[in-house]
Amino acid sequence: MKTNYLILSMILGFLSIGLQAQNIEAGIRQMENENYREARKIFADLIAKDNKDAQAYFYMGQSFLDVDNIDSARHYFNLGVENNSRGALNYVGQGKIEYNNNKKVEARELFERAERLGKGKDWRVLYEIGRLYLLAEDKNLDIAIEKLESAKDLARTNVEVWSTLGDAYLARNDGGKAASAYDYVLQNLKVESPQVYQKMALLFKRSRTYEEAEKNLEKAISLDPKFAPAYRDLIELYQITKKYSKVTPLLRTYTELVGDDIEMRIRLVGFLFGQAKDYDATIAEADKVLATQPNNAGMHRWKGYAQIEKEQYMEGLATMEKFFANVGEGKTYFMDYDYYARAAVKLGDMEGAAAKYRKALELGMAEDDVYDKIAKMYYENKKWPEAVEAYRQKMEKVTPTSTDFFAIGYSLYQMQDYKAADSAFAAVTEVLPDWLPGFVYRAKTNEFLDPKQDSLLAKPFHERIIVLGEADKKKFGTDLINAYRYLGYAAIKIDNFEEAKPILLKLVEVGVMDPEKFKNSLKEAYSSLGYIYLQEKQKEKSREYYMKVLELDPADEDAKKALEFLKL
């Protein structure tokens, strides 16, 4: 009788373990489908049945960690340790939080403790440590692969381990080993896993084999029509391949799958902004979350970003103010300040924008990007002194570009500091000897520095304009005419008529390409040629050119007087 009772106890014990594993796996499947609310119901039920269930505590904590709810994640990991100090997984959970808080030494100690408790035979411990090193912002792919390979050796039939190992190799750009891991699940384990088909799609997407990526995502959806991540990736793929007509119905299905689950909807909003770039939908879905969670900083962030992208700058700025009022300390990113600054610039708050850009710099935004944005902000809004100062500050921090020198030169030109402007433009033409605009502004600044053309300071720059501009007279017509006018006048001033005549004729050649636009310049050229031939006592030629002036402007008094004089 005792023997029978013992056998029955053993059967019930194994059955209990099997049921627990089945429930844990069911919860994990819900997490993979991004249905965290259902997953937590399963884990909560397991904890209620057995308050020492270390795995249930761990996965409950992981469900919060996946959506960046750090406080709730920490709470469950700590509860798991308190209720079962021998349960290794929750030390891994605590280590994940320490690692993400940049406490690498403390994290490593917790991971080592978990491995000791697992005695090197708990594949879940090795798997979760490897997964942390794979998914963390500061990832370590060598450690990730080492741990996942060890987990695979202990759980050779586990789909999660093989597919995540494939992810690690994919992250290391080893597509061959990634494909082998995914294929092992499909071919050797004979498991039709929607998750693995989704990952195969990512592999094809990276190699820009979009048709195969699409087939794999459609296969994932056919296997599990409620597998939300596949819909999300397929929407993104349709956008890449410009199959826009397919996006809307798929997005509707994805939204329906999200349902009323707030955390799923939060993830949806991030997707709508970042991948779908559907800013109207981003705002609408964010408002649905904010209706029940008015202080949700993440929703204010995405909504504010979307409003600014839609050029709703005043509304976007107000939303970003709410974001900053509700976000926790240390939970802002440089993009938050970048977006705020963009809106502030459009609303005319230059100083406020500059302050936000500098805050973005503190949070990791690239130096050259920050200083460039500040300088461009002043430059584009015609704040010339501030632009000069901002570009000079940029040049102190990063290697200046020809664009920087041109912007400084143009700002100084607008401030009528022509000598300093010419020095800046000289730096441009030195680097870009075939870029015509640089010589145009060198010519302009030197004309101001030598207004009477006594020293002909602008002459070499106008000559260079002609060399460069002759390649496309229509495109550079205005610059060519200005150059010919300057050089023609300079020659006439010293009575060098033989030099002046061909220059003025070249001006005419360009001017007649658009006589309405260049009417005044043509009049000047014809009048100057009339004057030259009058001085040379070639009355017929002189009369010919003064008549051309009157053809353009019958009321021109100077031409009339010249023609009257020629009758004498």
Image: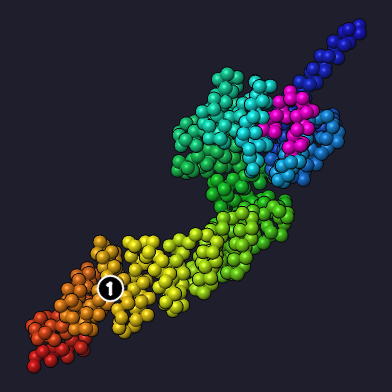
- Graded by Cα atoms within 10 Å as few (under 14), some (14 to 19) or many (20 or more), the crowding at tag 1 reads many
Q: Residue 520: which quarter of the image?
A: bottom left
Q: Position of residue 555 (x, y in %)?
A: 21, 86
Query: Considering only vertical position in the picture, is 30 above or below 433?
Result: above
Q: Position of residue 13 (x, y in %)?
A: 82, 18
The residue lying toward the viewer, choosing from 128 and 450, is 450
Q: Position of residue 52 (x, y in %)?
A: 84, 30
Q: Main secondary structure of the magenta part?
A: helix
**Residue 299 lies in the magenta-colored region:** no
Left or right of 113, for residue 309:
left
- Tally the marks: 1
Residue at x 68%, y 21% (from the top left corner): 154
Residue at x 34%, y 78% (from the top left corner): 447
Query: Which stretch appears magenta?
Result: 107-130
Residue at x 54%, y 25% (from the top left corner): 180
Residue type at the position of mark 1:
Ala
Residue at x 11%, y 84% (from the top left corner): 536
Image quarter where the N terminus lies is: top right
Can see residue 313? no
Q: Position of residue 92 (x, y in %)?
A: 75, 35
Query: Considering only vertical position in the picture, is 360 above or below 481?
Result: above
Q: In the structure shown, which secondary structural element does the residue marked by tag 1 occupy?
A: helix
The residue lying toward the viewer, choosing from 111 and 526, is 111
Circle 1 is placed at which residue position?
Answer: 483
Left or right of 558, for residue 171:
right
Left or right of 244, for residue 429:
left
Can see residue 91? yes
**Residue 119 lies in the magenta-colored region:** yes
